Amino acid sequence: MELAELLIILTGSLIVTAFARWRGLPAPLLTVGVALLVSLIPGVPDIEIDSEVILTVVLPPLLYSAALDVSLLNFRESRAQIARLGVGAVVVTAFAVGGVAYVMIPDMSLPAALLVGAVVAPPDAVSAAAIGRRLGLPRKVMTVLSGESLINDAASLTLVKVFLAIVGGASLTLWDDLGIFGLAIGVGVAVGLVLGFVAHRVRMRIDDPVIENVIGLLLPFVAYITAEELSGSGVLGVVAAGLYVGFNSPRTGYATRLQERPFWSAADVVLEGFVFALIGLQLQAVVLDVAESERGLGQSLGVALAVLAVVILVRPLFVFGSHYAARASRYVFLSPLLRRLRRVPTLRRVRATRGLRAVRYRPQPRMDWRQLTVISWTGMRGVVTLAAAVSIPAVTESSIAVPARDTMFLIAFIVTVGTLLIQGLTLPVVIRALGVRDDTQRDRDLAAELEIFGTSTDETMAYVERRRPVWEERWGAELTDRAVRSTTSRLLRQNEALQRTAVDDADERGSDGRDADGEPGARVASSREAPHAIGVIRRELLAKRREVVLRERDAGNLDEEVMRRVLLGLDAEELAMDTSALASRRS
């Protein structure tokens, strides 16, 4: 791909995405459609896709950005459902599609058919998440969809690696396959956690938001390449690093957080638009290649449509089947344990129960059939299916030709475009028809925000009383009292109204040298030191409030979405302080 072509694709996809966001349309669908129409224009050159570019340049930042947004606590709480969909659904889909392809394509071997299944197995949550956020899907559903999308890519790409090796003549047993899976998971997660820990510790020691965000920019690429070089899953390496950094990002500087999220949001828009534009631009070339092959377009298209039907049907069967099978297994295996626990004295029972899982004071409700239906209809394919398809070589390393490679490409593109059109266009209708939305989530979040604000205010006021002697020794009783009253009065007003208020410098320091009560200051030095004292105390109180918020989050008493909104308010308040102080120094 030439540089000019790259710039044209990026610019065009950005224009289409901007129009879609303005009109409230699904950007991925519109981008694919417009790109497909552009590819039909005579004279438009064929765009060559390098799979390494997709896998090593596009995929890591998309995964990292998604992992930063996922609540680690909610992810852990829904880990069973996420694992079933992220691994189990991928494996089942791969074998179901492989069986259909093996039966319908005479010259395709079983490993090659399973390779096709692995390519089209992983859904992409980009479209589903955008629709879900707009229509107010319950947070638990969004967590499952986002979490599934983080790990199903690793399962799919590992299967592609295994089946491609078998196509190339490798003799692998079931234990060999399980060993490859285990190594990919273990190495990938370990690399991601180690690099995430190192990056976080370095960012904590650097007081430079620009450099801190540059480290965050490089981290997904380093994690992916390192994990792949060590025979692990680069996808899981990126995901583990993103989850670790995202969970610990509230402990970094406020300026880093305020810069980080807008940057990754912009990167998501650019990269997602680029990928979906490539899908649309490639479809015509793929169809023409298949039409010139021995099988012809008719037979290959029939196989692709059959695979599309299997992909769409397998997901709801697996979602409902695995959900109710898991419930039945919990009843069979856990019920005897729970009955024995009822005979244990209360204190011992509490300790035993806590030993099974972390205590959560606000457990999320169990999913009903309507939510499962929505999840079963979110099977749109995307970037990984495209990257996996173009990564299949014409000839393996052992000089064995990959059978029906052109048909594989057609299947991958038909499944991607078909799921985007069929499920992407009808998903909003399904959500509205079933009434799957959480209208009370906003009220619960507001109640939680009020509660944490009250808790942090109470503990902050107690902190003020403990610190007052230290401040009085530093600035004197009168100046300390003035600074404390100015700071705590603002805090109390925020607590009552639950809204940020602008800092009125006139209330903090007047030109006539009077304190907050209108009495003359005890000395001129106090008037000059007042802004500094107020600033120091306000920063200490902001740090205390952040400490309380993070403590409640870590204990499971505060949802991470609410925590981020509260921290955003605290970060904005500290930014306003720094801006005001800078303006004062310049004046």
Image (cartoon, helix red, strand yellow):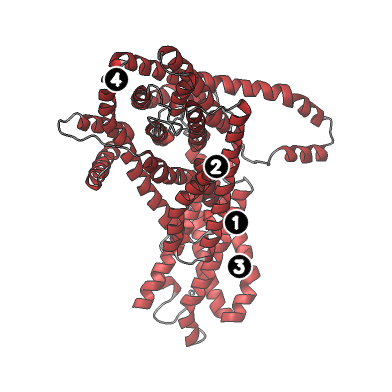
Position of residue 299 relative to residue 549, above or below, is: above
- Which secondary structure lies at badge 3? helix
Q: CA distance from mark 3 to mark 1?
A: 14 Å
Which callout, 3 or 1, points at the residue further toward the start of the chain? 3
Q: Is residue 297 above or below residue 55?
A: above
Q: Nearer the viewer, residue 484 or 225?
A: 225
Q: Amino acid at mark 2?
A: Gly
Residue tagged 2: 232
Mark 3 in CB contact with mark 4 (< 8 angstroms): no
CA neighbours of label 3 inside 10 A, class few (<14), some (14 to 19), many (20+): some
Callout 4 amino acid: Ser
The quarter in which the C terminus is drawn is: bottom left
Check disc 4: other Cα within 10 Å, few if <14, some if 14-19, many if 20+.
few
In the picture of the structure, the residue carrying the numbered disc 4 is 293
Upstream in sequence: badge 3 or badge 4: 4
Q: Secondary structure at mark 1?
A: helix
Residue bearing mark 1: 548
Q: Position of residue 169 (x, y in %)?
A: 50, 27
- Rendered image: mark on residue 464: 3
Quadrant of the frame with the N terminus: top left
Marks 2 and 4 sit apart, C-alpha to C-alpha, by 37 Å
Q: Residue at 51% x, 65% y: name it.
A: 489
How far is the residue under mark 2 from the one under mark 3? 51 Å
Mark nearest the camera among 3 and 1 is 1
Residue at 64% in and 68% down: 465
Mark pair 2, 1: CA separation: 38 Å
Q: Residue at x 29, y 16 (%)?
A: 296
Residue type indicated by callout 1: Val
Q: Residue furthest front?
A: 399
Distance between the Cα atoms at labels 3 and 4? 78 Å
Question: Mark 3: which amino acid?
Answer: Val
